[in-house]
Amino acid sequence: MNNYELKQEARRERYERKAEQLRAEAGRLHGQAHEMASAIPVGQPILVGHYSEGRGRRYRERIHNTFGKAFSTMDKADYYKRKAASVGRSGISSDDPDAVQKLKTKLAELEKLQETMKGANALIRKHKTPEAQKAALLEMGMSEAEATELLKPSWANTVGFMPFQLSNNNANIRRIRQRIQQLERAAERVTREEECEGYTYREDAEQNRIMFLFDGKPEENIRSLLKRHGFKWSPTRRAWVRMLNNMGRFAAEHVRIQLDKLE
């Protein structure tokens, strides 16, 4: 794994550990609430007007709240379990140093799929009977199940790959080509840093981030300014950061203008 993939794996493990801890705590709370409830005899009502009424109501309320905490904690455990499962599933990140190679592999797969879809449709148009069409599809390398599914009439009573399937795949091909070009240009960037009055401005090519660094915690108005322009506090970098791209530079320029006015 590269460093980015190792970080992703560590992040997934943190979420999984958090989920297990919360699941154990939920079990403990549920057991505690159950034990508290078992102390009340079955069918035992609150004795209205009796000196024990207040204590009885408070005890039942604690049972209710403990069960509620158990269910709420289990919901949090499920939330972190889902987060762990989603790590690395959102596509190829620009932060991944192998992003260009991975995108090129994905591009080759999509281009191959496009040619397969176009070739299959051409064979279907060429052959007039379902039997001949199926035989041609099998000869081009499709499985029995794939050929059978492709020759099922659609809602429009047509067979083969639908026009929207080809256009959508073609759009993905164009999008990935553009991302590859953008990342290849980004790889040519160099890290630069400027010491300004009250802050340091950095464009970190290796981390793919624009950063504002302050000696201490900036004032509330400065923090609000940064947040309005899409910058977030990064505890690991000890800086306010945003992705290093044209939109990020545009936002940073507006922030710098406002910061310089404050001096």
Image (spheres, rainbow, N blue to C red):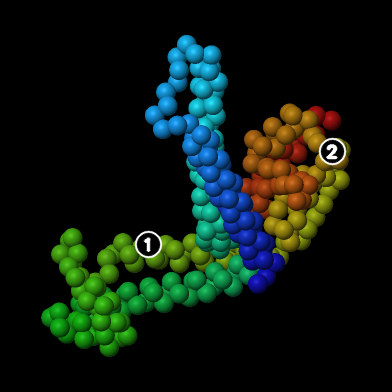
Say which amino acid is labelled 1.
Asn
Residue 144 falls left or right of residue 179: left
Tell me the SS state at disc 2.
loop
- The numbered mark at residue 216 is 2
> For the residue carrying disc 1, how many other residues have a C-alpha within 10 Å: few (<14), some (14-19), or many (20+)?
few
Query: Quadrant of the image for the N terminus?
Result: bottom right
* Farthest top residue in view: 49
Residue 221 to residue 202: above or below: above
Q: Residue at x 72, y 47 (%)?
A: 234
Q: Residue beneath label 1, please?
A: 168
Q: Amino acid at mark 2?
A: Gly
Instruction: Say whether residue 171 is visible.
Output: yes
> Where residue 135 sits: x, y (%)?
21, 86
Q: Earlier in the sequence, mark 1 or mark 2?
A: 1
The image shows residue 109 at horizontal and vertical percentages of 45, 74
Quick one: 104 or 216, which is closer to the camera? 216
Report the side of 144 relative to 233 (left or right): left
